[in-house]
Image (cartoon, rainbow, N blue to C red):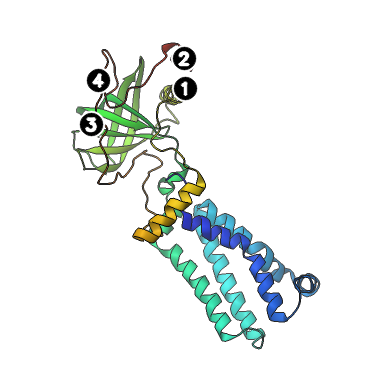
Amino acid sequence: MNRRPWPIVIIAMLYALAPIPNVLLSSAIEGRSVEEHLIGFMTNGDWLDLVLHLFLFPTTAVAVYLCKKWSYSFFLFASAVVIASNIDYAIAFPDLYSIGLIISVHTINIAIVSYFLIPAVRQMYFKPSLRWWESKPRFLVNIRGALQCENEKANCRVIDISEGGAFVKCAENLDINDKVNLSFTFHNISMSLNANITYLRRMDGNGYGMHFTDLASNHAARKNLLHLIRSLKLLGVPRKRVLKNWREDFKDWMLKLFKTGEGFIPKTEYSMNTGALLLPKNKTEIKPTKKRDNDDTDPDIQIPVDEKNWKKSA
């Protein structure tokens, strides 16, 4: 899944469109046409009502959709303002707003706020590494390399790599936050990258997701890494995930939701900084193919290489 969780998208859309049903409902309650309601609202309403009804909801929609740290605080603030405003209107105009309508509106507001209080949802707004849709493309490379942690050095296999990190398999036992150095050679380009272990998977051997740490200060390493990523794109190396059409993605999400109940609460399948993927238990192993002589890549995936294009891509 490469998009935002569909519940987040749907809630953002509801907030963006909220002024329309608000106007229609207010017009029906007042017994006036939509045009008469809007004219009266613009001429007699104060600026606070104008901001609340026409601008607060779309702004909240943007905040919810962006999934930033400030978005969460703004959402809670906006929700409190809306709930307080509804209570104020119900007290000021008891003849217009029935008990049933008040309960329904507050139930919807409280339900939405409760959804954002779920830890899995809340954490996406505070931890950028959980926002998988912001991750850089990860390329399947299966490159043989070496992983060094303190004085220990072991052979490893780089399963995939991105601009921010990599996922490797290694027999060495490592832990979260261990500092390592990943080195490998890909078609005459030598890489040496310092990283932190940020994710581990114990199925089918030890798998580690890592975040490259010193790219901002190590210009040579960053240049080589960007060179590698550009070349992988030019060579047509397969990516870990291909973005599906949004209609197909939404359809798949709906089917999964109704059949299994999953998808309502987002699962952090990806880590933006590590390029790590939580694989399902029933994943299919790629069958090895014949390995070419003097090839640095593992036999799982054979990458067609044009040395001329590789050298020009720097």
Secondary structure found at label 4:
loop
Asked if marks 4 and 1 touch (Cβ < 8 Å), the reply is: no
Q: What residue is disc 4 on?
A: 290
Picture coordinates of residue 79 (x, y %)? 55, 68
Amino acid, disc 4: Lys
Picture coordinates of residue 30 (x, y %)? 72, 80
Crowding at mark 3 (Cα within 10 Å: few <14, some 14-19, many 20+):
few
User: Which of labels 2 and 4 is toward the front?
Assistant: 4
Amino acid, disc 3: Glu
Label drawn at residue 309? 2
Which residue is at a point 23% across and 31% down the rendered structure image?
A: 150
In the figure, is residue 111 to the left or right of 102? left
Crowding at mark 1 (Cα within 10 Å: few <14, some 14-19, many 20+):
some
Which residue is at a point 67% across and 62% down the rendered structure image?
A: 55
User: Which of labels 3 and 1 is toward the front?
Assistant: 1
How far apart in space, not on screen, are marks 4 and 1 (Cα)? 24 Å
How far apart in space, not on screen, are marks 3 and 2 (Cα)? 37 Å
Q: What residue is disc 1 on?
A: 234
Q: What residue is disc 3 on?
A: 150
